[in-house]
Image (cartoon, rainbow, N blue to C red):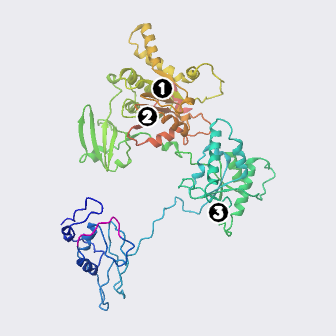
Amino acid sequence: MPLPPAPTKRAALLSPDAIDAPARSSHRGSRRSGEERADDAGSRGPQPLELFDNLGAEGGGETARPSRRAKAKAKPVPVPVPASTPAPVPVSAPQQPVAIQVETRVPTVSPAAPAPAPVAAPQAPARTKRSKSTGPAKLFVLDTNVLLHDPMCLFRFEEHDIFLPMIVLEELDGHKKGTTEVARNGRQTSRTLDALAGAQDADIDKGLKLDTTGHREAGGRLFFQTAPLDYSLPVSLPQGKADNQILGVVQALRDEYATDKPGKPRQEVVLVSKDINMRVKARALGLAADDYQNDKTLEDGDLLYAGSLALPADFWTRQSKTVESWQSGSNTFYRISGPLVPNLYINQFVYFEAPGEPSMYARVTEIRDKTAVLKTLKDYSSGKNAVWGVNTRNREQNFAMNLLMDPEIDFVTLTGTAGTGKTLMALASGLTQVLDDRRYTEIIMTRATVSVGEDIGFLPGTEEEKMGPWMGALDDNLEFLAKGDGGGAGEWGRAATNELIRSRIKVKSMNFMRGRTFLNKYVIIDEAQNLTPKQMKTLITRAGPGTKIICMGNLAQIDTPYLTEGSSGLTFAVDKFKGWPHGGHITLARGERSRLADFASDVL
């Protein structure tokens, strides 16, 4: 029989019929003894319903939820009691009412319980948050370049402690002036240190707690060098150099924390620096040194999400009994299940190619529980589906064109070697959606202005004229697209077409993007591998309603100093946006520029 209905209002009274309604018997034992049920039998009647048990009342009747009262009337499970025991032992009746639990279990009670007093159910110990590292907490000595590289690095060391030598603060003060990224990071680090030192109950001698400013993931303390330390470095290392002074501090701390002392437990001291030569010198002196790894999205560029997945050769054989398919317009949908589903992402491309069997190219559009829905793609390699006169030449290009032409996709990232058609496809799809479909109002193109060789100096003219030399790729691709779209219109027709195209393409500098909002724009960010994660975030957050952003780049051609494949802003965006329903990524594999460019990409 079902349980009594729950009241519709808070503190509503239950009817006597609802209270007296018998409950269905449960296979679990009742939490209350027969004596308590006998006491409650005489006091039946309308009882006010309270949201919580009354923990403070002793000896009073317990007011419970309807489901609890119904469970209390269930038939108890007999517990073996020795003959010498004068009364049955209540199994789990506590001396005081306890908080309501969702699931009740009958604890095993020893049959030789001598006392008839109620036996309280044992409480499970509180679950503590498991730390990510299992060893003892370390003491990390930070070099100045780490603070200037990532001003939030103080909160990236989990439960470990941090030590800042006085020379680091001195160097930090020398880098805070200016408008460069390094100067901004220096000022932000100084503000963070000031906030930690100004927190309530802050004690520099005992260490500043790193979680006082709201960063709960940081469980260690921050120590400053408040007294001179004794150390002896080789004579060949000049004592006046800042790097050597930091090495001396690390050596002194290593000797000081080598053994357990009252108030100073033994700790491993590690130098953290982005300077390779400094880490080499530290290891030569027998000191532990590490690189700062938190800025790297991936340790290995080969682990980057590719955006496509090859289905196994026995895919259709395994799915033959469970697959569902249906048609919607020109697309076919397949609902699949099995061990492949947990490895899929939304908007990931899958393909099946086997000799003697028809090929299938699809995109994951839905993942629910243990099933995924695949949607077949539009074939842009066919002449009837050409985009501004451009047809795709390989499988990955077709995947990319499906992302670029889908109005439901707001963010697209394209990676690949030189000559894979990234810029050409982005421009062709942009012109089609701006001039033909009227989906966007204009194309905005920008890129990181990082030169390959020596800088040529200041450029004259307006913002667009200054960006002109950096936009050679745009001019080359527009020339190709204008040739294909001429259609025998003659010289005047081609000139008019070029003017129309130029009027809908705006070239902007990244330096003036802060604070802008793009409405119904098609934004192309070229050479995005040269952007830092912070710059990438600044550009992507400019997108307003109806805007689509395309980021393109070749991770093998990074020209920005101190930026690697693992720490590039393009890698950062690809990794963070994978699986987002309105974003997609594809890695273009084969170059189509020329046989010379394709061979050079492989051998050089």
The quadrant of the image that shows the N terminus is bottom left
Residue pointed to by mark 2: 412
Q: Which residue is mark 1?
A: 444
Q: Nearer the viewer, residue 369 or 302?
A: 369
- Which residues fall within the magenta stretch? 45-53
Q: Is residue 208 magenta?
A: no
Residue 274 at least partly seen: no
Quarter location, residue 226:
bottom right
Residue 294 higher or lower than 90, as above or below: above
- On screen, residue 313 above or below 108: above
Amino acid at pointer 3: Gln
Q: Position of residue 389 (x, y in %)?
A: 38, 20
Q: Nearer the viewer, mark 1 or mark 3?
A: 1
570 sits to left or right of 105? right
Three-letter amino acid code of the residue under disc 1: Ile
Residue 26, visible in the rendered structure: yes
Residue at the spot of label 3: 267
Question: What is the crowding at mark 3: few (fewer than 14 residues within 10 Å), some, or many (at least 20)?
Answer: many
Is 51 within the magenta? yes
